[in-house]
Amino acid sequence: MPDLSLLPSLDQLTKAPKMAKLLEHYGRPLSLEAARAVFDAIRADYIHHNVPVPDQAEIIARVKTQLDIWLKPSLVPVINATGVILHTNLGRSPLSHETRQAITAAAEGYTNLEFNLTSGKRGKRAAHASRTLAQLMGVEAGYVVNNNAGAVLLTLSALASRKKVLVSRTQLVEIGGGFRIPDVMRQSGAKLIEIGTTNRVHLYDYEAGLENEDIALVMVAHHSNFKLIGFHSEPDLAEIVAAAHRHGVPVLHDLGSGALLDTAHYGLAHEPMVQESVAAGCDLVCFSGDKLIGGPQAGIIIGRQNLIKRIRVHPLARALRCGKLTLAGVTATLSHYLKDEAVSKIPIWIMIAKPLADIQITAENWRQFLGAGEVIAGCSTVGGGSLPTEEMPTSLLALDPPKPEAFTAALRNAHPPVIARIEDDRVLLDPRTVFPEQEGALLRNLADAWAAAQA
């Protein structure tokens, strides 16, 4: 019969040499907590299932396993073989080498985050990215917060709380995570004044709204993750800006993805660019730092200095402000555009611009290494709510394992995890979104999963 008295005391266990090593490596408090959890599990197995008490070596092994489970990071690098460049679920934009270096440098020690090196007095953290944004975009000022949703909320709160904001019904969008323009308006305290219809809005709708209402701000929201087609029309942005300015009302353009390069040069539809919003005369433009900019997660606001100042001093700005690592990363990423090297340095643009012939060669090399599957024509997408319905031609390695779901699960459980996609019961892997330095790990994990699937 199993004997619970064989279970050592916690004090006895801690005196064992192997347990002492765990205490030293993992820290005494956490190691003791893990030991108590293991003891509880052993007692429960004994009482409910009459399971014998394991020996001391096994107990210590279980304690180590428990510690490893608790300390295993939940956020880990993965190999994106889906062909979705800005994959929201996979963290969107991978960062350039220079951007990673800038973040590391800022993380390694102290910085002049809020210290003016010239005067020796306290400075403003907003100054770091603002200068780069102003120079790059040709605007008076810029401000960086933690994401674009925060940028829009902060702008509305600072400029239009308890005031009226004019928005077309064609732009009352919802993006990922349930972020809805009407809800954000309500949260900011602004009063939404809708004009036009679901599919059409005219310049005279804007004119009528500006004449008949006491409007504090006109907001134009880019559709981002959907398209209006068929019987649809909207005035040009410059026309909206001109109408608003005739009434002395500033215009906020929420661009969402915020491209700085023309996507049409790479066989895609034209994504509205930040420079175009500035040229149209928008007083403020908000966009993401981690989508088509290709930097870390951030919300960027650019425009008139007097409006940016009101945004920067608003109480909500402190809650939404970003830290030194984000500021360093954003500034380094924007520097690529200043130096006209974005296509050769920023990973998402390298992927977008990647020649189809190079992708075909890589896919064929994968097939030859694995000795299975076939290379087929397929499509990559930009993703991240950018350029909906737009696709880029690519070459895919298509595999036919007996159980596609089990095969992709095995890839996800590999080290590092490999994320593929399934279409028509075939597992597809797209070289466009796999970095050259990842190919060795991908092929090793792919070969292991394929061998297991054939066993």
Image (tube, helix red, strand yellow):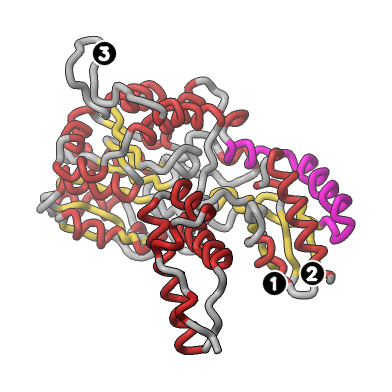
Residue 240 appears in which quarter of the rendering? top left
**Which residue was labeled with disc 2?**
453
Q: Secondary structure at mark 2?
A: helix
N-terminal of the pair, mark 1 or mark 3, is: 3
Q: Quadrant of the N terminus?
A: bottom right
Examine the rendered structure and indicate whether residue 37 appears above or below residue 351. Answer: below
Q: Position of residue 307 (x, y in %)?
A: 20, 34
Query: What element does badge 3 sit on?
Result: loop
Tag of residue 112 = none
Work out whether mark 1 precedes mark 2 in sequence or the reverse, and give the earlier one.
1
Towards the viewer: 44 or 397 = 44
Magenta segment main secondary structure: helix
CB-based contact (under 8 Å), mark 1 and mark 2? yes
- Magenta segment range? 347-375
Q: CA distance from mark 1 to mark 3?
A: 58 Å
The x, y position of residue 128, in whole percent, is: 32, 24
Q: Where residue 406 is drawn, which disc sits there?
A: 1
Q: Nearer the viewer, residue 113 or 256?
A: 113
As shown in the figure, which amino acid type bears the numbered disc 3? Leu
Q: Where does label 3 land, which residue?
A: 117
Q: Viewed as shown, does residue 416 lie left or right of 300?
A: right
Q: Is residue 410 above or below residue 122?
A: below
Q: Nearer the viewer, residue 321 or 389?
A: 321
Mark 1: give few (<14), some (14-19) or many (20+) Cα within 10 Å.
few
Q: Residue at x 80, y 46 (%)?
A: 360
* Residue 131, position as x, y percentages in the image: 33, 22
Task: Tell me the quarter of the image containing the C terminus.
Answer: bottom right
Q: Secondary structure at mark 1?
A: helix
Q: Of callouts 2 and 3, which one flags the residue occurring earlier in the amino acid sequence?
A: 3
Spot occupied by residue 293 in the image (x, y as percentages of width and height): 48, 38
- In this rendering, the label closer to the viewer, 2 or 3: 2
Q: Is residue 12 visible?
A: yes
